[in-house]
Image (cartoon, rainbow, N blue to C red):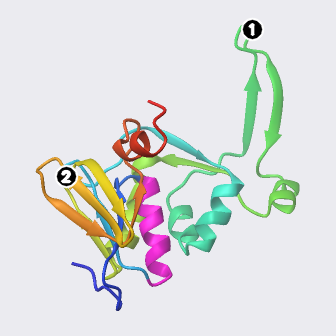
Amino acid sequence: MANSNGQALPILIAGGGIGGLAAAHALARKGFAVRVLEQAPEFREIGAGIQLGPNIFYALERLGLKDAVLADVHRPPAMEMRCALSGERVTRIPLDDPRFMEKFEQPYAVTHRHDLHSVFINACKSNNLITLETNRSVEDFEQDDDGVSLILQSGERVRGRALIGCDGMWSKVRDKVVGDG
């Protein structure tokens, strides 16, 4: 269990993907105790490649994780857009041109989602303000003046000071808050 840092209740995060772990890491860096509840039996990212534009590197720099991510990415020399019908090149953006870095101040890279997720999971595991829990499927939540209670699939209730929903495509949290199906 994470050190509460003098706080009675942790911030709860439903979902242990890239978004949930990034939120946990950012909150812990600000001194908040965090509990991440992941429904799967292990923390792992599902999916394939992911493009990382300069905007993500600004965020990674603020989180102190830019160098860890850059250590395991591919930085292609250029990006090309081609016509879907003829295959003819429409445009080419040279990413290794010094003007690209001059303009955006951050690189462009590609990586596998698993590699990016691993950077976040390692950062979270090394912070005693973060508790990572698996096999914890969120079914519902109730909010009151003093915080929030998660209701897990097992029937167990978990109390926190706030809830962040990062529980994916079929999010129970989003469905209850936004109701957009």
What is the chief secondary structure element of the magenta stretch? helix
Q: Which residue is drawn at the image coordinates 42% and 80% (left, top)? A: 32
Q: Which residue is mark 1?
A: 86
**Label annotation for residue 112:** none
How packed mark 2 is, by other alpha carbons closer than 10 Å (few <14, some 14-19, many 20 or more), is some
Q: Is residue 98 above or below residue 31?
A: above
Quick check: 170 left or right of 108?
left
Q: Camera-side residue: 65 or 34?
A: 34
**Label annotation for residue 152:** 2
Three-letter amino acid code of the residue under disc 2: Leu
Q: Is residue 26 above or below residue 18?
A: below
Q: Quadrant of the C terminus?
A: top left
Which image quadrant for residue 5?
Answer: bottom left
Quick check: 117 left or right of 57?
left
How far apart are the alpha carbons under marks 2 and 1? 52 Å
Which image quadrant for residue 16?
Answer: bottom left
Three-letter amino acid code of the residue under disc 1: Ser
The magenta-colored residue range is 18-31
SS at mark 1 in the image: loop
Q: Measured from the top left, where is residue 83 in percent x and y?
A: 75, 16
Q: Measured from the top left, where is residue 101 in percent x and y?
A: 81, 60
Q: Measured from the top left, where is residue 58 in percent x and y?
A: 68, 65
Confirm whether the magenta stretch covers residue 26. yes
